[in-house]
Image (spheres, rainbow, N blue to C red):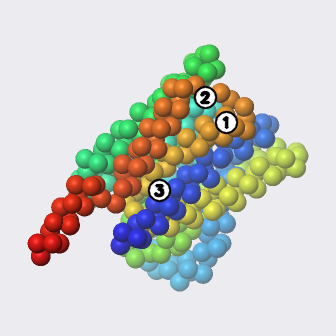
Amino acid sequence: MMQGQAWGVVAILFAAVVWGTTGTAATFAPDVSAAAIGAAAMGVGGIAQALVAARGIARSRTALWDQRRLLVIGALSVAIYPLTFYGAMRLAGVTVGTVITIGSAPLLSALIEYLLDRRNLTLRWSVGALVGLVGMVLICVAENLSHGEVVGGDSVPLGVLLGLTGGLTYALYSWSARKMMLRGTRSSVAMGATFGLGGLLLMPVLIATGGPFLASWTNAAVGIYMAAVPMFLGYLSFGFGLARVEASMATVITLLEPVVAAVLAVLIVGERLPNLGWIGVVLVVGCLVIITMPMSLGGRFRAKAQFEQS
C-alpha cells in the first residue's frame, strides 16, 4: 500500500515537472495566443489520451454511463481549465496567474473533499499546504520585483478571478477522476474519457484561434510538444498517481510546477530570480517533504513500540 502510494507520488512529481516547462516552451511561439496554446495542449493531448485508452473506454462504457455525472463534471472542468489558466497569465502576468491558479488548487481541492466527501483535513497536510502557498507568494513577489513593476496592470483583478476559476476547475477534474477510479474505473479509462471529452469541447477554440501554429515550424513544434509531453505524458502520469494518492495531496504536490517554471525562466529565458524567490523555492520543496513523508519520526517510534509490545 505504502509502496503504491510512493509510486503515485513519483508519477505526480513527474507530471508537475513537465507541466512546469509549458511557460518556457510558449516563449518560443510568441505569435500564438494563450487560448490557442491552451486549446492545443489540453485539447489535442486529451484526445490522444482517449485514443490510447479507446479499447478500455469501450469495454467500460456501461460503467462510464453510470458515472456520467462525474464524467461531465470532469470534462467541463478540463475544457475550462486551460482557457482560465492561460487567460489569467495574459491578464495578470505569468507569475501571478500561475501562482493564483496552481496555489489555490490544493485549498479548493481540500474544500471539495470536505464538503462532498466529508473528509477531515490532517494537521500535516494543512501545515504543508500553508508552507507551499507561502513559497508561491514569495516567488510571485520576487519575480515582480525583478521586473521592477507590478505585472498585469489594471487587468490584475480579472486575472486573479480567472486564476481562481482555473484552480477550482483543476481541483474539480482531479476530484471527479479520482472518484471514478475509487468506484472501480481504471485510471487510464477515467483520465482518457474525461480528457477526451474535454478535448473535444476545446476543438472549436483551437479551430478559431490555432492558425498561427501553421505559420512556422517553430510554432508547430511548440504545439506538438505541449500536446505530447506536458499534457499527454504528464496527465497519464497524473492519472496513475491519482489512483494511488488523495486528490488534495496530488494538488499540493503539483505546487512544484511553478518552481520548475521559475528555474527554467532563469536558466533558459534569462530571467533573474532574486534571493526572496529562492527562499520561496525552498519553502515549496519543504512543502513536498512535509506532505509526502510516509510517517513522522514520532509515528515510527510509536509503531515500533506497539510492534515490540505485541
What amino acid is labelled 2 in the image?
Leu
Q: Which residue is mark 3?
A: 173
Q: Position of residue 214 (x, y in %)?
A: 85, 49
| Residue 297 found in image quarter | bottom left
- Pick out the residue farthest to the bottom: 59
Horizontal arrangement in the rendering, residue 149 relative to residue 104 (left or right): right
Which of label 3 and label 2 is nearer to you? Answer: 2
CB atoms at circles 3 and 2 under 8 Å apart?
A: no
Indicate the secondary structure of the residue bearing disc 3: helix
Q: Say the numbered circle drawn on residue 9.
A: none
Cα distance, mark 3 to mark 2? 32 Å
Q: Which residue is mark 1?
A: 265
Cα distance, mark 1 to mark 3? 28 Å
Which of label 1 and label 3 is nearer to you? Answer: 1
Residue drawn at (88%, 46%) of the image: 216
Q: Earlier in the sequence, mark 1 or mark 3?
A: 3
**Which residue occupies the foreground of this view, 66 or 98?**
98
**Which residue occupies the foreground of this view, 29 or 277?**
277
Q: Which residue is mark 2?
A: 273
* Residue 118 visible, this orientation: no
* Residue 186 visible, this orientation: yes
Q: Which quadrant would the N terminus be assigned to in this image?
A: bottom left
Residue drawn at (62%, 16%) of the image: 148
Q: Earlier in the sequence, mark 1 or mark 2?
A: 1
- Crowd class of label 1 (few under 14; some 14 to 19; many from 20; radius 10 Å): some
